[in-house]
Image (spheres, rainbow, N blue to C red):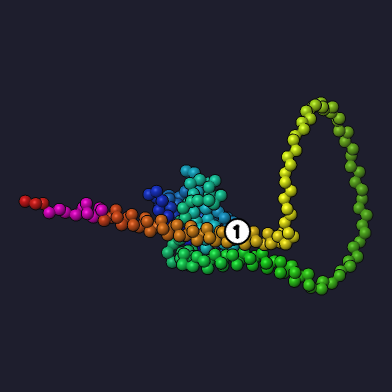
Amino acid sequence: MGEEHWSLQHDGHEHVVTIAQGALVRSVVWTRDDAELGRKKTSDETIVVTSTDGGAVRLKFPMVGPARRVTLHESEAAAHTGLGGTDLEPEAGSKAAARAEWIGAHPHLHTARQTALAAAGVGVPILLVWLLTLVPWPSLDIPWPDIDLPSIPWPSIPWPSIPWPSIPWPDINLPSIPWPDLPSLPAWTEPVRKFAIPILIAFFIARGEVKRRRKAEEEKVGEKAALGRESRGDSRASAPTDPTP
């Protein structure tokens, strides 16, 4: 079904995550400097691969298609929470790289699309249920047989009666705190809350993804600039000097 390659230069080491997409499961292999740190095979949409040194990578997949995010974390606990970490970069020319470039070029459109998908995920099931209530379903009267099942004579077990001691717990009268009565919310807020919360969650997730992409691009530009300054400094140091007589 094809392979994906995600890579990252971190603390002087090259991390590479290879994803093999199968018909039902995905196989993930994580290497550092060509040495395998961990592997996992599963059909889950969220995968955490751990290593013996305590680090971990977290992978997020949609229902179908390539990975949406591969992140390096310092610990397995941080990988399971999904907070922080350093994102790996997809292979140039891949579908994941094209998606990342599109998000960077159209951040507002990406946020609007993810929010619209969340709204559709909430509204479409409600619409389908409402349409089903309009269908004139036939009334079925099935004459189920009346079967007398036999009575099973379960044995009576004489459980022993243990005289447990009675503990005289002290009767403590706690003070009553006069909490103020909060006003009741209008009736229309309950359905709005059920619909709005998933939409807001999708909105903030999309905005967070856009911010992560911007941060990753800024870090990449900074690393390239630092490497350029180091290479220019090395070239000046190695340039021959003209000795004066």
**Residue 111 falls left or right of residue 141:** left
Determine which residue is flagged by label 1: 201
- Regarding mark 1 in the picture, which secondary structure is present there? helix
Label 1 environment density (alpha carbons within 10 Å; few <14, some 14–19, many ≥20): few
> Vertical placement of 14 versus 163: above or below?
below
Q: Position of residue 34 (x, y in %)?
A: 41, 52
Front in this rendered view, residue 59 or 212: 212
**Residue 213 falls left or right of residue 224:** right
Q: Amino acid at mark 1?
A: Ile
Q: Position of residue 149 (x, y in %)?
A: 91, 53
> Vertical placement of 119 versus 235: above or below?
below
Q: In the rendered structure, does residue 139 fall within the stretch colored magenta?
A: no
Start and end of the magenta stretch? 233-242
Q: Is residue 99 visible?
A: no
The residue that appears at 52% across and 68% down in the rendered structure is 109
Q: Main secondary structure of the magenta part?
A: helix
Front in this rendered view, residue 30 or 62: 62
Corner quadrant of residue 7: bottom left
The residue that appears at 65% across and 61% down in the rendered structure is 196
Q: In the rendered structure, does residue 240 fall within the stretch colored magenta?
A: yes
Q: Position of residue 174 (x, y in %)?
A: 75, 34
Front in this rendered view, residue 188 or 35: 188
